[in-house]
Amino acid sequence: MKPSKNDLRDVNFTDDPKEKIKKDIFAKFRDMKAKVGHTIPSKWLTLRYYHSLTPKEQEYFEIAIKELVDEGFIDNNMGLKQKGYDKIY
């Protein structure tokens, strides 16, 4: 039997929204087979991805991106840096 939409048994309430966003960003780079310097298309990021997030995740979106920049994985223009490349491959 298919679970109803109101069934919350599969929801993990301990997931960190920032970490989910970071993983999604890395997955997008990997799906694009990105190399150092490649950027995620801004249309995908703002028009598709952001709107797919829950309201709580949207609150953490800019924080997660800033952390990826601060940690040296991407640059301010969403370009993949060597450290990010090494992490996803």
Image (cartoon, rainbow, N blue to C red):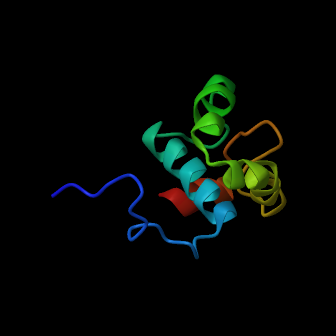
Q: Is residue 4 left or right of residue 11?
A: left
Residue at figure coordinates x 63%, y 54% from the top left: 21
The answer to which quarter of the image holds residue 4 is bottom left
- Confirm whether residue 89 shows in the render: yes
Q: How many marks?
A: 0
Q: Residue drawn at (58%, 71%), measured in percent from left and top?
A: 15
Q: Position of residue 65 (x, y in %)?
A: 76, 51
Quadrant containing the N terminus in the rendered view: bottom left
Q: Nearer the viewer, residue 88 or 50?
A: 50
Determine the residue positioned at 59% across, 48% down: 25
Please determine whether, in this image, residue 64 is positioned above or below residue 39: below
Indicate left or right for 31 with 60 as reference. Answer: left
Task: Name the foreground residue: 19 vs 37.
Answer: 19
Farthest residue to the bottom: give it: 14
58 in relation to 20, above or below: above
Residue 23 placement (x, y as % from top left)? 56, 58
In the image, what residue occupies the spot 27% across and 58% down? 3
Residue 22 percent coordinates (x, y):
63, 57
Which residue is nearer to you in this view: 21 or 38? 21
- Residue 66 lies, in percent from the top left, at 83, 54
Q: Nearer the viewer, residue 55 or 74?
A: 55
Instruction: Judge whether residue 81 can be spotted in this image.
Output: no
